[in-house]
Amino acid sequence: MAWSPEKTEVKSWNEWDTLRHAIVGRADDCHIPPEEPALDAKVPEDSDMRGQWGRRPQETIDRANELLDNFADQLRKRGVRVDRPVSIDHSQPVTTPDFHTDSQFGCMPPRDVLLTVGHEMLEATMSYRCRWFEYLNYRPLLKQYWEEDPNFRHEAAPKPRLTDADYHPDYLSEKIGDAKRLEWAAEKFFVTTEEEPLFDAADVLRFGKDLVVQHGFTTNLKGIEWLRRHFPDHRVHTVNFPGDPYPIHIDATFTPLRPGLIVNNPQRRLPEEQREMFHKNGWEIVDAAQPAHNTPPPLCYSSTWLSMNVLVLDPKTVCVEKSEVYQAEQMDKLGMEVVEVELRDAYAFGGGLHCCTADVYRDGECEDYFP
Ligand code: NVA
């Protein structure tokens, strides 16, 4: 049955079919969280964020919200139904029987927390203590979807304990250096241990019957095994990108645009032995264009490669951040219509155009692209 804006339906099997309904995050009450093992391992050693925490300055929150609101309106004008999360008070500490941290993070980006697979939205375990309760920002929406769509499956992965046993102490040193980090990444020695299943939703890409999951800082092998058992009708593939000294979240590294075409970060190439399923099925993996910026904006966790963190609206149309002119030019050459979206001043809140959204509904069914 064709999608109708009057009827809520959750369904999305991949990253590229026509987007009809999405969640766009908010910058409300976003905090730079206090130090904790997994977060410290991720913040680049030369970052301006080292050693500071607290609520982000109000003027930066207002500016990010202005951009996120504009993006939501742009999507609405193109016929996409857009919902927004309801921010909890992120200044509240997180205390469980196993750990305490003094504040939380925010409700940007939803892509990190919510994984939509078919008629299901799955709340990820998360791997940072400050993000333990982040799903609460989305509960009003998920409650609504559950009440309005009788086929919607609202699932939550087991909450992890996140004791010190979850983190390798080697990563807690102030100065490790990129050479060491790259050596460890090549050995698949990441900050998270295999104590219990851990995954962030943004480490997963959906290709119909196949789920491609990055093993790195925020997703461990047990997390991938948990996904495998949770989605028994899917094939779950583990991928690594050894060129990345801070491997979290796959969506500034590997970006499918349409069936048969993926853009891959040239500094984080998928190893040859992991390309087989793509090559065997005629998929092309092309190097992404260079980012337009040499540095991320102030107080930003992410790399300049948010340039390739694009949102595909349908197999011929893609949203690209307005200042990312090289990425836009490449998309054009690859036959995509480019929709420019201004978002750079919101990057610091947790990412780009793919990060700041979560799928609720895309056309299309679950296809097997790698038979
Ligand atoms: N590892 C990523 C996160 C992007 C969403 C980066 O390049 O910063």
Image (cartoon, rainbow, N blue to C red):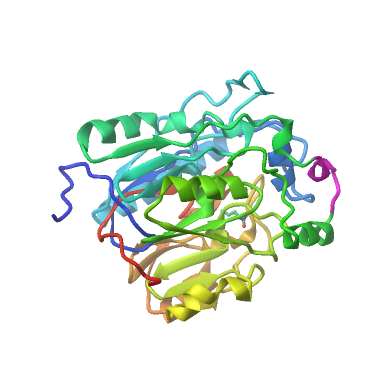
Classify the position of the N terminus by image quarter.
bottom left
Q: Residue 3's spot in the image, x, y percent?
A: 18, 53
Residue 168 colored magenta? no
Q: Residue 299's spot in the image, x, y percent?
A: 66, 44
Whether residue 109 is visible, yes or no, is: yes
Residue for point 35% across, 47% down? 72
From this view, report whether residue 226 is shown above or below residue 291: above
Whether residue 329 is visible, yes or no, is: no
Classify the position of the C terminus by image quarter.
bottom left
Q: Nearer the viewer, residue 122 or 60?
A: 122
Q: Is residue 92 left or right of residue 149?
A: right
Residue for point 40% across, 51% down? 232
Residue 174 colored magenta? yes
- Ligand 1, by image quadrant, is bottom right
Q: Residue 261's spot in the image, x, y percent?
A: 44, 75
Residue for point 36% across, 63% down? 16
Q: Residue 258's spot in the image, x, y percent?
A: 38, 70
Q: Is residue 151 left or right of residue 212?
A: left
Q: Nearer the viewer, residue 55 or 199?
A: 199
Residue 87 picture quarter? top left
Magenta part of the protein: which range? Answer: 169-176
From this view, report whether residue 357 is shown above or below residue 152: below
Residue for point 31% across, 65% down? 367
Tag count:
0
